[in-house]
Amino acid sequence: MRAFGVSFTRALVILAPLASGASYALANVGFGLWPLAFVMFIPLWWSLDAMPQKSYLKIASAGFLFGLIAFLLGTHWLLALNDGFIKGNTILGSLLWLGLGAWFALAYAIYSLVYGVLKSRGFSLLVSGMVPLVLLEWLQHNLFPSYAGAGLIHRIELAQISSLGGPLLMSAFVVSINSILYGFLAQGARFVPSQCLRLSAGGVFIAAALFYGVSSLQGVKSVPADDDRLTIGVVQSNLVRHRSEDSAFLRHEAHLQQSRELLSEFDVDLLIWPESAYEQGLRRPLPIDGQFIRKDIDVPLLFGGTSIWQSNGRKVTSNSVFFSNHEGKIAQSYDKNRLLPFAETRPELSFMGDLWDTLIDIFPQHQDFKRGTTKPSFKMGDTRFSVPICYEMVLPDYIHSMVAEGQPDFLITLANDSWFAGTQEPEIHLALSQLRAIEHRMWVVRSTNSGVSAVIDPAGRIVARTEMDVRENMSASMTAQRYFSWYSHFGNWLVLCVLLIALCDASRLIVAAKRSQKNTISQAKAS
């Protein structure tokens, strides 16, 4: 019977990281089971603490299993790229996906090792669980960054704390609740005074976050005043991107026709076309006359396209956004800074010779864009706006630097999510845009080829949106007003705070060790 109990415990120790990783994925953006965020680390921590015959390999393996299941369950939508990007090679696509998952999981193997070391040295559960996670998320180098607290966007009152400390504060918040509940359970779930105090602290944290969130929602206006109103028109053509000799011409004409339909119904101050709406390429340097693009449209037009220019005797292209003002002149543009490897840029591995060219051909849709190096904002009258392109919107640190450099009044992001039709990715992309709106307390407009296009207020509320995979026009009113955001001004200040917390806990351990040593010496002298 005892042997059965030991075997059962060992089985739970192995299964717990898998349950923890699954909870991480289900609690995150996309699935929306956000309450799991408050318990998702408990099975992993229990597994690490209950592990018989601890070894670095076993501890790292538990963390690796956690990270792998979290990635595979949470990013299954990446497999949709098999058809468009790698000629339907499902085996290769699955291997690449697993490779990304292994890289993500490796970070959590390191996290588990640090947790184990800190816990064994006597550090508190809060420090052991939270400090390495915040540092991991701050330093992460993942293609698609992941944050433990991002799923709170599905409970928008709780997500308001991201305006204070960005995604790292949201992660620290959920991990602190995890640590409080785990500490309560680890002590037998007994309602003794010390445990009641612990649970009360967790309740105070949640109540404070809810109070701040409700106050923020009431303080941020989602309906602009008449004298400060800016009306946006968005064209969602639902033209799936493809390559053919006449596709660029047809796409341009389709956007023009749909724009005429929108303008016949709404008066707008700015018309927006999505990423890659104009594919024929615009030659630089600017300014140029953009009348041949907007034709009979007589309102300012923002659109995605391709820049073309000569550099050192060869043609260079970039994924760009252009702005055509009231007079039709195009004098402002932005080149995408963060390019997706193998989709928008090809790593330079010329030493591989012909083999490298063969490998690149596996990705038939790959481009070789030049990366932009500046983050200018666009000027329209007295207002300024910045335009991150597609993938850039999922990178909070990049958006923070863009806002700091361009000082925009609001954000417009152009995207093409048609590659992911039928998956959760478009809704995930939208949810992450909501977080960026909250983080910087500014309006965000999304213009996409096939959905989801949306207008989001500075509290992350969706004012207007389109559906997925439909041809649709959208018009909504907003304002250039920007509210104060602690995160926008001070960035990742939380990193310094968690390091100070760890330092304080280390000081406590040093003082306790010296006191213990002093008592031991005193007892030895007395005897």
Image: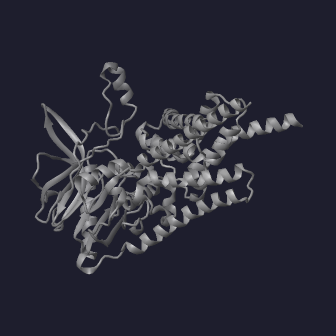
In this rendering, is residue 54 above or below 304? above
Relative placement, left or right, of 517 versus 359 is right
Q: Residue furthest front?
A: 526
Residue in the foreground of this view, choosing between 18 and 327: 18
In this rendering, is residue 166 above or below 49? below
State the residue at coordinates (36%, 74%).
221
In this rendering, is residue 6 above or below 190? above
Colouring chosen for the image of the structure: one colour
Relative placement, left or right, of 453 versus 332 is right
State the residue at coordinates (28%, 44%).
337
Res 325 visible: yes
Is the N terminus in the top left, top right, bottom left or bottom right quadrant? top right
Residue in the foreground of this view, choosing between 313 and 26: 26
Res 18 visible: no
Relative placement, left or right, of 405 versus 52 is left
Number of marks drawn? 0
Q: Residue furthest right?
A: 1
Residue 249, image x and y in percent?
23, 52
Residue 482, image x and y in percent?
29, 66
Relative placement, left or right, of 402 versus 314 is right
Residue 404, image x and y in percent?
27, 53
Is the C terminus in the top left, top right, bottom left or bottom right quadrant? top right
Residue 114, image x and y in percent?
55, 35
Residue in the foreground of this view, choosing between 437 and 317: 437
The image quarter containing residue 27 is bottom right
Q: Residue furthest bottom?
A: 226
